[in-house]
Image (cartoon, rainbow, N blue to C red):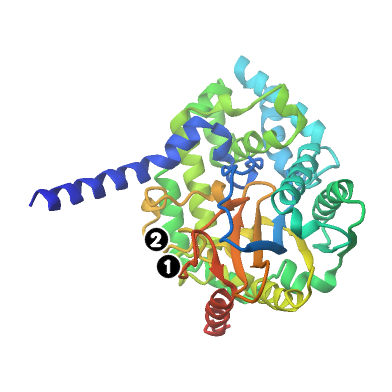
């Protein structure tokens, strides 16, 4: 009886800790509330689990998101700027609202004609990721080994690739590097599946999401702090839209050099910030995660990428010193790929949107700026034996839905069979 009660108490404690985790993590670091705008934090795991005795790394297959960037288009900046500028011309801003406008002007001018472009921080992130990859797995990059790098045809991805390759060249000038960025490869590097996209947000799911958002929207206090005429902002301002774009500007500021001088996070209190994050977190879960409300099929948007990664690994593993295959793209590929691979608990279906954060789904853990998935392959140093694989998400070891050989190490044959079977069962 005592054992049963103790077990129940442990379950309750575990559930409570899980429910508190996202809120606690965002309280500890407010930048995490930015979700996909969260600047790459670097690996949490400094020391990796040693390989099984007699094994060494010999090949890496990688897919990573571009580094930190400016927001994608001028509208991301103009929506807030135009609303505040017009209110200012009519003397409808509070002194605090005038100061918010001053900061928005600085942010807008900093990004002018640089929409979607890689920032200095984004370049630094990819040099750092490449440097750690080289230091952690020096055997892979030894001598005149080959590095095959591909990028989507978007300039921020190309520059991310080039910064990574420059760092590798600096560390080993003997590397034989081939790099490319072409629409020829977009069918798997950044696949746009229009048929699957239509299945992500059917009418019933859209209603569930809109109802969820309505329960977590708080903008009255924010509007009153910025506008001194309540009748004006209630009738002339789209409060929901302006609040969202203020949050977007605040979130992305961490990716620019202005982060050293100003912030917009003071606009929001703790509860408002968390609720804005909740809405974004749920949106990403529905559109790119294993959400059962739409059948959980969104991760299959990366079926081409996963299949190509397996096929290219099969080819490279035949060589005595295959080096590395590096790919640079977008978060809309990394998130569903992590879910498709069922890394840790990222393939977990959660039907109730109100329970997503309680169940520990935290999008900022998967796809910050510069996020990446690395497959590290190991072989016996002498004699014959199984090829092993370890998968890193953002440079941290992960669990796979397979029987492990040891710790985070799995047989490549098991990995290959499991995921090719999974892909074969998907009905397009």
Q: Is mark 2 on a helix, strand or loop?
A: loop
> At 13% across and 51% down in the image, what residue appears?
3
Q: Position of residue 81 (x, y in %)?
A: 71, 33
Quarter-wise, where is residue 376 in the image?
Answer: bottom right
| Extreme residue in the top direction | 95
Does the residue at mark 1 contact the one at mark 2 (Cβ under 8 Å)?
A: yes
> At 58% across and 83% down in the image, what residue appears?
428
The total number of labels drawn is 2
- Measured along the vertical axis of the image, is residue 123 above or below residue 192? above
Asked if residue 187 lies left or right of residue 236, the reply is right
Given residues 226 and 190, the one toward you in this image is 190
Label 2: few (<14), some or many (≥20) within 10 Å?
A: many
Residue receiving disc 2: 350
Residue receiving disc 1: 292
- Measured along the vertical axis of the image, is residue 183 above or below residue 255? below
Q: Can residue 60 be seen in this view?
A: no
């Amino acid at each position: 009886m005592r054992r049963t009660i103790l077990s129940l108490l442990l379950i309750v404690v575990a559930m409570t800790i899980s429910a508190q985790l996202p809120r606690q993590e965002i309280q500890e670091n407010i930048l995490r509330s930015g979700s996909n705008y969260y600047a790459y934090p670097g690996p949490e795991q400094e020391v990796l689990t040693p390989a099984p005795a007699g094994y060494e790394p010999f090949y890496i297959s990688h897919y990573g998101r571009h580094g930190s960037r400016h927001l994608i288009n001028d509208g991301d900046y103009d929506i807030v700027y135009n609303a505040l500028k017009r209110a200012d011309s009519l003397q409808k801003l509070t002194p605090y609202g005038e100061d918010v406008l001053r900061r928005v002007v600085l942010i807008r001018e900093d990004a002018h004609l640089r929409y979607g472009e890689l920032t200095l921080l984004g370049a630094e992130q990819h040099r750092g990721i490449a440097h750690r990859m080289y230091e952690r797995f020096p055997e892979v990059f030894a001598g005149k080994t080959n590095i095959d790098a591909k990028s989507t045809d978007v300039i921020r991805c190309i520059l991310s690739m080039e910064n990574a390759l420059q760092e590798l060249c600096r560390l080993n000038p003997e590397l034989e590097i081939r790099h490319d960025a072409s629409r020829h490869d977009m069918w798997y590097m950044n696949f746009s599946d229009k048929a699957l996209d239509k299945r992500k947000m059917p009418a019933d799911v859209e209603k569930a999401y809109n109802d969820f958002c309505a329960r977590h929207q708080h903008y009255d206090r924010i509007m009153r702090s910025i506008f001194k005429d309540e009748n004006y902002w209630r009738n002339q301002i789209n409060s929901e839209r302006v609040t969202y774009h203020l949050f977007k500007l605040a979130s992305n500021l961490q990716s620019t050099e202005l982060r050293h001088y100003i912030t917009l996070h003071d606009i929001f209190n703790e509860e408002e910030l968390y609720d804005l994050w909740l809405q974004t977190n749920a949106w990403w879960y529905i559109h790119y995660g294993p959400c059962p409300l739409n059948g959980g099929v969104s991760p299959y948007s990366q079926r081409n990428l996963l299949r190509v990664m397996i096929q290219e690994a099969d080819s490279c593993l035949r060589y005595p010193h295959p080096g590395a295959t590096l790919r640079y793209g977008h978060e809309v590929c990394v998130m569903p790929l992590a879910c498709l691979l069922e890394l840790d608990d990222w393939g977990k279906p959660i039907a109730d949107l109100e329970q997503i954060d309680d169940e520990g789904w935290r999008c900022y853990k998967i796809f910050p700026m510069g996020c990446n998935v690395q497959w590290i392959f190991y072989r016996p140093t002498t004699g014959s034996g199984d090829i092993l694989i370890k998968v890193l998400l953002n440079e941290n070891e992960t669990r796979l839905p397979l029987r492990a050989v040891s710790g985070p190490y799995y047989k490549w044959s098991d990995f290959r069979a499991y995921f090719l079977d999974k892909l074969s069962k998907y009905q397009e």
